Amino acid sequence: MSDAIRYDWTVDEVLALMTGPLEPLLERARCVHAEYGAQDVQKCRLLSVKTGGCSEDCGYCSQSAHYKTEVKAETMLPTDDVLRAAREARDAGATRFCMGTAWRQVPEGQKFREVLKMIRGVRDLGMEACVTLGMANEAQLKQMAEAGLTAYNHNLDTSRDYYPKIVTTRSYEDRLKTLQAVRSSGVQICSGGIVGMGESVRDRAALLVELACFKPHPESVPVNLLVPIKGTPLEGARPIAFEEFLRAVATARILMPTSRVRLSAGRNTLSEAEQLQCFEVGANSIFVGEKLLTAPNVDEQEDEALYTKWEGQPASV
């Protein structure tokens, strides 16, 4: 049996775990992962329903109005188009449909009413519905919960200390306040971070501790690998070694045994063998489809081959 589920990890404790000998770390993660259903990998589809023109200055983001990137501001997609995409995703095997908007915070009025329609429509298709809309208050989240929202994504991105080097237009406390409102509304929390933004290993440990202190743990924890975007402050970020990413995935699994650890942005830069390693030590969810908001993703045929190989492995890996 694995370790008992905990909510009191310290940064020093997690840093020691994350930087210790590699194989004991991976083996511990494998054991936890096997106990909590390693073979069950969820397919999710992410669609940008309102692209570009965001007033936030997140240093990694192609959709920020602060930077000159290839992404241009667009109007919100019609609800019928969004639900058509959700139906196609369902028919292709996805069980969760995620909708993202380049907003600083959830607006009131007609746009919010359209979001509620999208949520209801996705649930009517028999899928889980997730949105990532920026900051949201408890009243808005309760309305989304009533519409059937499964999960709300609001990533912490990085550690509390490193965060001001990545984002200056909203505080870490703003992000935590939204996540607390999500929990209070009864909607599941989807929150993770990005690896490879120039942060230290201690920053990665601190981010995971922040997430693991939620009780219960976030139901979904996306682990993103930075996709450097031309025109953003992080376009020249140094790529990190795969082992660093693998250590982050394995540590996330150990700290949050029951959470969905989702391979998200940057998965297209990993080889098939590297993705399978991530599945072995903690990952049990991926985004499918050719694009993640504005970032490239893995080809559908490559994903099918990956799934076939993973499902053919014994459950005790």
Image (cartoon, rainbow, N blue to C red):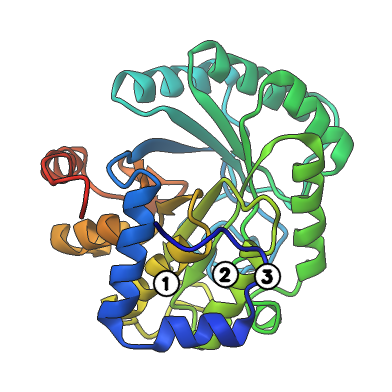
Q: Amino acid at mark 1?
A: Ala
Residue 120 can be seen, yes or no: yes
On-image quarter of the N terminus? bottom left
Mark 3 or mark 2, which is nearer the start of the sequence? 3
The residue depicted at 51 percent of the width and 85 percent of the height is 15
The residue depicted at 71 percent of the width and 22 percent of the height is 116
> Distance of mark 1 from mark 3, alpha carbons?
18 Å
Residue 113, given in percent of the width and then of the height, sits at 76, 22
Q: Which of pointers 2 and 3 indicates the residue nearer the eye?
A: 3
Query: Does residue 153 appear left or right of residue 87 in this picture?
Result: right
Q: Amino acid at mark 2?
A: Leu
Give residue 248's mark.
1
- Decide: marks 2, 1 in contact (CB < 8 A)? yes
Residue 272's place in the image compared with 79, above or below, is below
Q: Mark 1, residues whose alpha carbon is within 10 Å: few (<14), some, or many (≥20)?
A: many
Determine the residue located farthest toward the front in the rendered image.
1
**In the foreground, 84 or 11:** 11
> Distance of mark 2 from mark 3, alpha carbons?
12 Å
The local secondary structure at tag 2 comes to: helix
Residue 299, given in percent of the width and then of the height, sits at 21, 44
* Residue linked to disc 2: 208
Give residue 8's mark.
3
Mark 3 or mark 1, which is nearer the start of the sequence? 3
> Distance of mark 2 from mark 1, alpha carbons?
9 Å
Query: Does residue 241 appear left or right of residue 99 in this picture?
Result: left
Q: Mark 2, residues whose alpha carbon is within 10 Å: few (<14), some, or many (≥20)?
A: many
